Amino acid sequence: MKVLRHITDEELKLVAGTDAALYIIFIRYAAIFFLYITLINSIIFLPIYVTGSPKNTTDIEEAEKDGKNKTIVIALLTSINITGIPVKQIIVFVTMIIFYTLGAFLLMYFYWRRSMSWRHRKHSHKETFYD
């Protein structure tokens, strides 16, 4: 049985070229970013949404019933549940802005660092570059 191994970024660059390798690396970083967003939403925001209370209880009561008058649980897991508590609403949105912006900047920084290191080495005469 043949064992599959992880291809390094340098090997990927040699096989696919610099542009394709950078695109694949960007897709990998984007997947990590969306995993980060998913974990933040699940760990921090989902409990806040569940423990919140809406400004108008009639809004959520109408939204949480389907045609058969059964409760739709997913309607309780949205940001409409925290509108009745202004402090909780401010905390959620400020936290979202901070964590999501920080994650986006980290994504851009790591991608920029990788592309700059390859671009610098491309023009370096100390190393053989195959592209």
Image: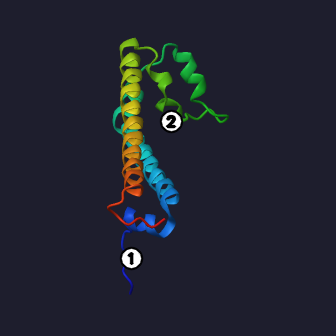
Q: Earlier in the sequence, mark 1 or mark 2?
A: 1
Nearest to the eye among marks 1 and 2: give it.
1
Q: Amino acid at mark 1?
A: Leu
Q: Which residue is farthest right?
A: 67
Quarter placement of the N terminus? bottom left
**Residue 3 figure quarter:** bottom left
Q: Are marks 1 and 2 in contact (CB under 8 Å)?
A: no
- Which is more toward the observer, 10 or 6? 10
SS class of the residue under badge 2? helix
Crowding at dot 2, Cα within 10 Å, few <14 / some 14-19 / many 20+, comes out as: few
Left or right of 59 in this view: 41: left
Q: Position of residue 63 (x, y in %)?
A: 59, 26
The residue positioned 50% from the left and 22% from the top of the image is 80
Which residue is nearer to you in this view: 41 or 68?
Answer: 41
Q: Residue at image x 41%, y 64%?
A: 129
Q: Residue 73: give its label.
A: 2
Decide: few, some or many residues near mark 1? Use Cα within 10 Å; few <14, some 14-19, many ≥20: few
Question: Is 53 situated above or below 64?
Answer: above
Q: Position of residue 125 (x, y in %)?
A: 36, 60
Front position in the image: 12 or 88: 12
- Amino acid type, callout 2: Val
Residue farthest along the bottom direction in this orientation: 1
Q: Where 32 falls versus 82 (above or below)?
A: below
Q: Is residue 91 left or right of residue 13?
A: left
**In this picture, is 45 found above or below 54?**
below
User: What residue is at 52 percent from the left and 36 percent from the top?
Assistant: 74
Where does residue 126 sit, x and y in percent of width and height?
32, 61
What's the mark number on residue 4? 1
